[in-house]
Amino acid sequence: MLLREQLQIVNKLLNKLYTFDYDSDHMKFKEKKNTNKKISRKRGLFITGTDTGVGKTLVACGVAQLLRKRRINVGVMKPFATGNQIYSRNFKSQDTELLAAAANVGDMDNELNPVFFPIAASPLMASLITKNHISLKSVLSAFQRIRRMHEFVVVEGIGGIMVPLTNSYLLGDFVKLLGLQLIVVSRPNLGSVNHTLLTVNACKKYGLDIVGIIFNRMPSRPDIVESMTPQFIRKLTGIPIIAIIPEQARPNSKATGRCMERWFADYIGVDQQTT
Ligand SMILES: Nc1ncnc2c1ncn2[C@@H]1O[C@H](COP(=O)(O)OP(=O)(O)OP(=O)(O)O)[C@@H](O)[C@H]1O
Ligand SMILES: [Mg+2]
């Protein structure tokens, strides 16, 4: 099928959809009243995703690049990281190295990434295995220090929003403590509708504010499901699409940042007017 014909079919099908809001207490969708959220200034964004490996680091690096291009002093953080081994002498996690390079910051690794376990598992599981306690208080202090040093902070999560950190805190509880708005990184392929709705629903339960969803790794020749998924999810959730990032032969944070340029111009613009 030609791509143009496919898009026409997708648009026709999407016109039949209404925007719904998931009412988790009653386990059903209810009609949504107002989808136009005003963006308030929070001086930072938390990048979460529908799963591990979905593209949070690439997106966070893209956001950092964009902000730098606008001469904003941007800080980055990867509060919790786990992996099979320590990455390098300077950075325990590769994500921290990529984030620090994209933002061009010289903050210390233990401030950028206060919690690291050399076991690829959730922080709670890794802490149980290694018998090491996680102090959320010290992670929050590191965040406040990074925040004082920079105008805007981009924080990358770990896995998805319900990753357990301690016996009493999941990642969503932690984001609530930071008080940041979120970007959700998703994919356009089969399975994403379920993962994205679960993520959106969990964020709502925590009272978190999702500013938009990014669909990463759109193939150059998408099938009808992949073409339809971003708008399908936008219609179902009422949450704006920030960008659709193509599959890249060599993933690059500058090119990724350019995909989000238009949305960020509005975001930063509205932001400045409200302060
Ligand atoms: N648009 C893209 N095109 C091609 N490769 C991509 C794209 N986005 C991400 N990747 C690759 O997919 C892998 C996972 O991406 P990334 O590290 O950004 O995901 P993540 O969500 O941060 O993962 P983690 O949960 O481990 O932190 C990386 O090797 C990255 O280079
Ligand atoms: Mg990552």
Image: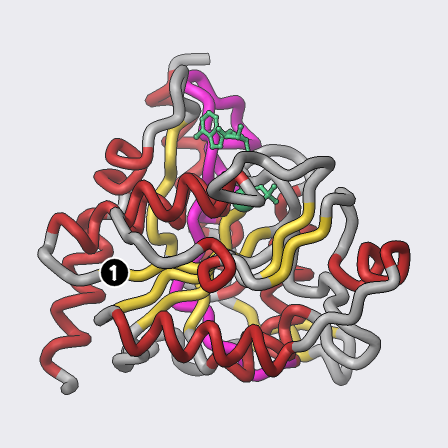
| Rendered view: 100 above or below 177 | above
The residue at the point 27 percent across, 72 percent down is 149
- Name the residue nearer the viewer: 186 or 164: 164
Left or right: 207 in relation to 73: right
User: Which of the 4 quarters of the picture holds residue 134?
Assistant: bottom right
| Rendered view: 6 above or below 134 | above
The residue at the point 77 percent across, 82 percent down is 26
User: Which of the 4 quarters of the picture holds residue 58?
Assistant: top left
Residue 223 screen position, x and y as percent? 53, 22
| Rendered view: 70 above or below 97 | below
- Name the residue nearer the viewer: 116 or 241: 116
Residue 75 screen position, x and y as percent? 31, 61
Residue segment shown in magenta:
206-231
The residue at the point 38 percent across, 76 percent down is 145
Q: Secondary structure at mark 1?
A: strand
In terms of image quarters, where does ligand 2 lie? Answer: top right
| Rendered view: 103 above or below 274 | above
Left or right: 253 in relation to 191: left
Asked whether residue 12 appears in the rendered view, the answer is no
**Number of disc labels:** 1
User: Which of the 4 quarters of the picture holds residue 162?
Assistant: bottom right
Asked whether residue 217 appears in the rendered view, the answer is yes
Residue 208 screen position, x and y as percent? 52, 78
- Name the residue nearer the viewer: 174 or 101: 101
Left or right: 16 in relation to 204: left
For mark 1, does the 10 Å Cα neighbourhood hold few (<14), some (14 to 19), or many (20 or more) residues? many
Q: Which residue is mark 1?
A: 74
214 part of magenta stretch: yes
Look at label 1 and name its amino acid. Answer: Val
Residue 34 screen position, x and y as percent? 40, 80
Q: Quadrant of the C terminus?
A: bottom left
The residue at the point 73 percent across, 77 percent down is 169
